[in-house]
Amino acid sequence: MPPEPRWPAEPLEAVAAYWERQPLYAMFGIAVEAIEEGYARIGVDRDRVPLRGVRDSLNGGVVASLGEAAAQLCLTSQLNPNEVLGVTHEVSVSYLTSARGEHTVAEARLLRRGGRVAVADVELRDTTDGAINAKIRVSMGIERVEAAP
């Protein structure tokens, strides 16, 4: 299996196409909207997510998963060629308001990147009114891989 394309070595379109084929992205039609060094934004249209929560909002588990997905994408902008995403260590979600807008985005910023662990801060918001629906903190592992001979 070929390695995943990474920004900035690969164009945003190639990176987006790779991530958008992953099961969570494909299931809910999640789009990669932006990637910069230490930053990523993904978006989803509400009508693509059939799981509903309070007041017909996005389900809380979906909100947490969107936060984790944005954080993972964000971290890939900082990985070296001999590193890959490791397991997620922790996802902490503060639900502030119901995500009921037509389009919701998750914006991730890398707070700290160490040798083995990285932490990202994610804001999930409705684009209709700009309200922050949730603040999400994600801790992820970084694994080293051996270079092919």
Image (cartoon, rainbow, N blue to C red):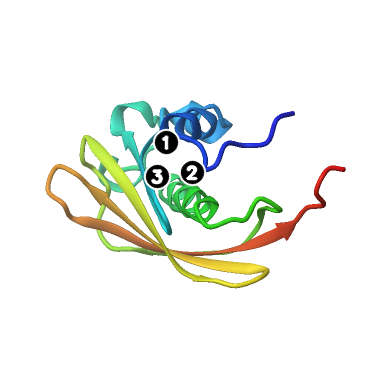
Label 3: state its secondary structure.
loop
Residue named by callout 2: 7
Whole-percent x and y of residue 49? 38, 32
Q: Is residue 53 left or right of residue 91?
A: left
Residue named by callout 1: 12
Density class for disc 2 (Cα within 10 Å; few <14, some 14-19, many ≥20) is many
Which residue is at the front of the view, 60 or 75?
A: 75
Name which residue type carries label 2. Answer: Trp
Q: Residue at x 41, y 28 (%)?
A: 29
Residue named by callout 3: 59
Alpha-carbon span between mark 2 and mark 3: 30 Å
Density class for disc 3 (Cα within 10 Å; few <14, some 14-19, many ≥20) is some
Whole-percent x and y of residue 19? 52, 34
Name which residue type carries label 3. Answer: Asn
Picture layout, residue 14 above or below residue 149 = above
Whole-percent x and y of residue 146? 82, 52
Alpha-carbon span between mark 1 and mark 2: 6 Å
Q: Residue furthest front?
A: 149
Q: Residue at x 66, y 61 (%)?
A: 142
Q: Residue at x 19, y 44 (%)?
A: 127
Q: Is residue 17 left or right of residue 33?
A: right
Picture layout, residue 47 above or below residue 38 = above
Label 2: state its secondary structure.
loop
Tags 2 and 3 in contact by the CB under 8 Å rule? no
Density class for disc 1 (Cα within 10 Å; few <14, some 14-19, many ≥20) is some
Tags 1 and 2 in contact by the CB under 8 Å rule? yes
Picture layout, residue 10 above or below residue 75 = above
Alpha-carbon span between mark 3 and mark 1: 29 Å
Q: Is residue 117 left or right of residue 69?
A: right
Name which residue type carries label 1. Answer: Leu
